[in-house]
Amino acid sequence: MEADLRFLQGRWTQVAFEENGATDAPDAHGSPKAVTTIAGQTFHVAV
């Protein structure tokens, strides 16, 4: 898992979002164009 996590580090722009089977549903965790930042073993989503 550590090797995979290393490749995910940085800032990512979401192009789609799915939660509980609903695609691109508006909520506090993400939306299209949201930016997800992964640092170490934590992440932050800015909408």
Image (cartoon, helix red, strand yellow):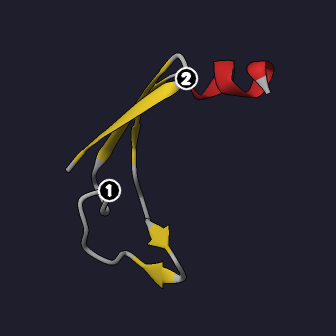
Tell me if residue 11 can be seen: no
Q: Name the element at disc 2.
A: loop
Give the spatial CA distance, label 2 vs label 1.
17 Å
- At a point 43% along the width and 66% down the height, the residue shown is 17
Q: Amino acid at mark 2?
A: Gln
Residue 42 percent coordinates (x, y) = 47, 27
User: Could you say which quadrant of the image residue 23 lies in?
Assistant: bottom left
Tell me if residue 42 can be seen: yes
Residue 36 percent coordinates (x, y) = 37, 39
**Most foreground residue, 42 or 33:** 42
Q: Which residue is mark 2?
A: 41
- At a point 53% along the width and 22% down the height, the residue shown is 9
Q: Dot 2 surroundings within 10 Å: few (below 14), some, or many (20 or more)?
A: few
Q: Dot 1 surroundings within 10 Å: few (below 14), some, or many (20 or more)?
A: some
Compared across the picture, whether 36 is left or right of 5 comes to left
Residue at the farthest bottom position: 22
Comes first in the chain, label 2 or label 1: 1
User: Could you say which quadrant of the image residue 11 lies in?
Assistant: top left
Give the quadrant of the N terminus: top right
- At a point 37% along the width and 75% down the height, the residue shown is 24
Q: Which residue is mark 1?
A: 29
